[in-house]
Image: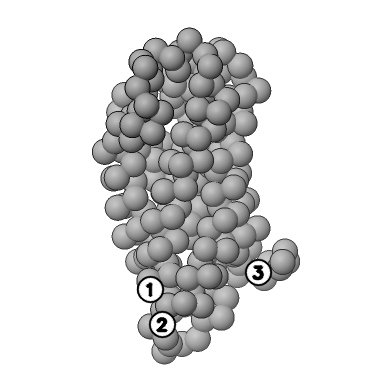
Amino acid sequence: MKTKFTVSQLVILGLMTAILLLMAYTPLGYLNIGPLAITFNVIPVAISAITLGPVGGAIAGAVFGLTSFLQCIGVGGTSAMGVILFDINPVLAFIQRFVPRVLDGFLLGYIFRGARKLTNVSVACLATGFCSAFLNTLFFMSALILLFGNTEYMHGLIDGKNVILFVCGFVGINAVFEMISSTILTGAVGLALYKARFVPGAAVGKAAA
């Protein structure tokens, strides 16, 4: 696995980190609706994975996860669910907020590489953007059920429903909106960066190859 970044790649990583921090500490990153929030932070994570591979994606995911956890204590906004989970168990709250985002970014690097071998860069970027939002929701909710499923808080939310039906109903339109926005924006930005030769293996004039 390549772990050394070029100067241009370090610039991209710094830029994506700055964007993640900006989005975390302004209304740009989260749209709070009920206990969950629509987040746009999955997009810089996907871009980092496309341009920097699994390690870069994991680093961006770690920044995202850390800012998400800090919302549990009111830093950079407040997550209604995060506050409750932190009160129940702060260590598990950190794991639930942090680890899924790191894993998401790490896997996205391989997803882009795999998709790039099978199709053109445009489709690969679109697929990576979709997977960024999809995996973020999947890992986040899986960790929530696994770590807090036996708590009184979660019992109240699930209210006797089938777990799968609960998850689908709980994330609802939030997850759909995240997937659509992440797919479109990651596809557009990823293709632009490919044309600018910021994506490994890029070549001028072969953006659709």
Residue type, numbered disc 3: Val
At a point 44% along the width and 61% down the height, the residue shown is 128
What is the secondary structure assignment of the residue under circle 1?
helix
Q: Nearer the viewer, residue 80 or 198?
A: 80
Viewer-nearest of discs 3 and 1: 1
Identify the disc placed on residue 183: none
Question: Is 164 in front, or is 92?
Answer: 164
- Which circle, 2 or 3, is nearer the viewer? 2
Q: Residue furthest bottom?
A: 205
Q: Are marks 1 and 2 in contact (CB under 8 Å)?
A: yes
Badge 3 or badge 1: first in the primary sequence: 3
**How far apart are labels 3 and 1 at the CA level?**
25 Å
Question: Residues under labels 2 and 3: Cα distance?
Answer: 22 Å
Q: Which residue bears the numbered disc 1?
A: 122
On the image, the x and y values in percent for residue 12 come to 55, 62
Q: Give the quadrant of the N terminus.
A: bottom right
- Separation of disc 1 and disc 2 at Cα? 8 Å
Q: Residue at x 56, y 41 (%)?
A: 100
The residue depicted at 30 percent of the width and 52 percent of the height is: 180
Please tell me whether mark 3 sits on a helix, a strand or a loop.
helix
- Classify mark 2: residues with Cα within 10 Å, few (<14), some (14-19) or many (20+): some
Q: Nearer the viewer, residue 121 or 119?
A: 119
From what the image shows, is residue 164 above or below residue 180? Answer: above
- Above or below, 108 against 9 in this view is above
Residue 126: give x, y in percent of width and height. Answer: 37, 64
Residue under label 2, please give it: 207
What residue does disc 3 label?
A: 7
Mark 1 or mark 2, which has the lower sequence index?
A: 1
Location of residue 78 by image quarter? top left
